[in-house]
Amino acid sequence: MKAQHLKIKEYCRISNNRVLLNDELLLEDLGSDFITFIKLAYKKMDTNYPKFFKMDDLSKLGFLATDILLKTVTQDSEMPKNIALVFSNSASSLQTDRKHQESIVDKENYFPSPAVFVYTLPNICLGEISIKHRLYSENSFFIFNHFNAEYLHDYASSLIKTEKADEVLCGWINCDVDDYEAFLYLVSTEGSIAHNKEEIIKLYTTK
Amino acid sequence: MNKTYLSYNNIVSSIGFDSLTVVQNIHEGLSGISLIEDENLFPNPFYASVIDSDYLEKAFKKLKPNGEYTRLEQMMVLSLDKIIQASGVALTDRVGLILSTTKGNVDTLDPRNPMPAERAYLGTLGHIIKNYFGFSTEPIVLSNACVSGILAISTAKRFISQGTFDKVFIVGGDIVSNFILSGFNSFQAMSSLPCKPYCKQRSGINIGEVAASILVNKDQDNLPSEAVEILGEASCNDANHISGPSRTGEGLYRSILSAFKEAHVGPGDIDYISAHGTATIFNDEMEAIALNRLGLDAVPLNSLKGYFGHTLGASGLLETIIGMHSLYHNTLYPSKGFTELGVSQPLNIITAPTAKDLNCFLKTASGFGGCNTAAVFKKVQS
């Protein structure tokens, strides 16, 4: 069975104003706010995708973490890759929901905008990534109170076992009032880290 | 691989609080869409399918709940309660709980809402439902725009086939809120009349609210007579646009193709299509293109949005349940609101209740973020 030999090929973390790819620290900018930091990260990571600036914070965060992991993989490929996206978080799209809510709360000052409203769904982030990396693949966005390694593990294994995906980009992308966090890992048939619940938790908790 | 079945089911909607009543009402051509005048929801009168609040409250009070519950929580509890009771399933650590919703308790973000805004966290909603019934496992909330309801069925099947659970209860729900109405209105997507999917005169969507629930089961015993087997399912992104459907229907085309592959069926095996049909110009046209690319243009098809409006995260689940009953009754139900074909490719829209031997149906959905899902269901042979 294919699924028994699944590995974690690569992983990326963006949190506490640091960007890490596998064990390597790519960027650190302590002290700046999220907007300043994510702009800097966009520049330093050679993202080069002007549509990035139209995205909400959740999409920016998920887009950037994915781009760091997949840029070389999808750029060098003629054929679209079958990489599923399985993201999760605890705050859904609440940061943008609050923004839309502010625009409709006062009848005298009523200004709902489609450019904001479209981001009031967490899976829009998956859509942005799919467009950039030409992924005509499985997309699922789950909401858990806390990072849930077991569910992500089982779901990713199932997608590869049933040949719905060749690889699965999995993880946690969260933006809330005071904090943000991105942790993504690529489940594949290649790699050196075993794909099991314990290893996923280990990678997630090593910050 | 394990087989998986859709079993006990319930719908809480503006045209009934159980599946049988709802299906009977559809057979009789009753729509839940009406003109609503409520300035707390929207500044101008609008067409929507809204559950009667007094009726909901009375039905919920009969359960003798402890504590305060939001409108959506009441709808979800009422719906799920019926199928947990009917199935007699004990909520052990082998039984999962999946919620499908796009916006959950988003109405609590409104400062005028008496409930705390923290209630808008979807994980909180999941735990409220979990604790009400005493589920032993962590709830899984799926929020994947308008494909959530059907993707929740796929998700349940995937967790069962992976061995995570033996049975999964799914409850899907979204409410009509000023949040949603103002947003879709800003997109100019709302129709000023009852919606008319695939029709030449269509002019956009109506929003609706339901809670729907279903038991997904790997055992063939203890199935109700309308049970179906999930033969295959898939979900593919358009990789095209975040708020507009693909002009070629690429993601939907790929989803159906992939679901067919897993189901080992072809277009000739499909007796009925329960399509998405939101009644926007672009969505319905996209579906017509995708279905024609697959040679599915002659298969009888309906959209149920003319009865319930677009019920967002619940729609796929709701419409799958109606499809199950359609198969069981060997009856095709009309696509309400349709008079004259208004897409560029042929489709076989159902215009009157029609008796026909039905064995297999295809359910599809598409949504913001470029997501699409398709699933194939087959009658359980008794």
Image (cartoon, helix red, strand yellow):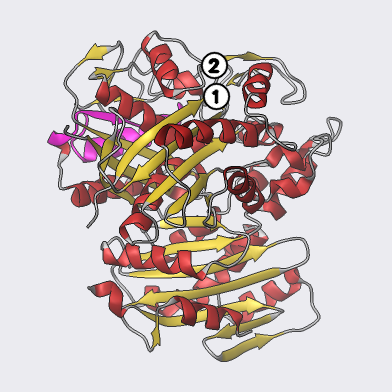
User: Compared with residue B330, is residue A205 higher up or lower down, i.e. above or below?
Assistant: below
Q: State the residue lying farthest toward the right.
A: A108
The furthest residue to the top? B28
Q: Secondary structure at mark 2?
A: strand
The chain identifier of the residue carrying mark 1 reads B
Magenta-colored stretch includes residue B291: yes
Looking at the image, is mark 1 or mark 2 nearer the viewer? 2
Query: Pointer 1 and pointer 2: residues touching (CB < 8 Å)?
Result: yes
Q: What chain does mark 2 sit on?
A: B
Q: In the rendered view, would you say B106 is above or below B326?
A: below
Task: Tell me what residue is drawn at x 28 percent, y 27 percent.
Answer: B225
- According to the picture, the residue beneath numbered tag 2 turns out to be B33
Q: Residue at x 39, y 75 (%)?
A: A187
Q: Position of residue B324 (x, y in %)?
A: 31, 29
Q: Earlier in the sequence, mark 1 or mark 2?
A: 2
Question: Where's residue B49, x and y in %?
Answer: 57, 21
Q: Which residue is mark 1?
A: B206
Q: Quadrant of residue A5?
A: bottom left
Q: Nearest the camera: A194 or B1?
A: B1
Q: Quadrant of the C terminus of chain B?
A: top left
Binning the other alpha carbons within 10 Å of mark 2 as few (below 14), some (14 to 19) or many (20 upward) gives: many
Kind of residue at badge 2: Ile
Q: Amino acid at mark 1?
A: Asn
Q: Are marks 1 and 2 on the same chain?
A: yes
Q: Is residue A81 left or right of residue A131?
A: left
Q: Which residues are magenta?
A: B268-297
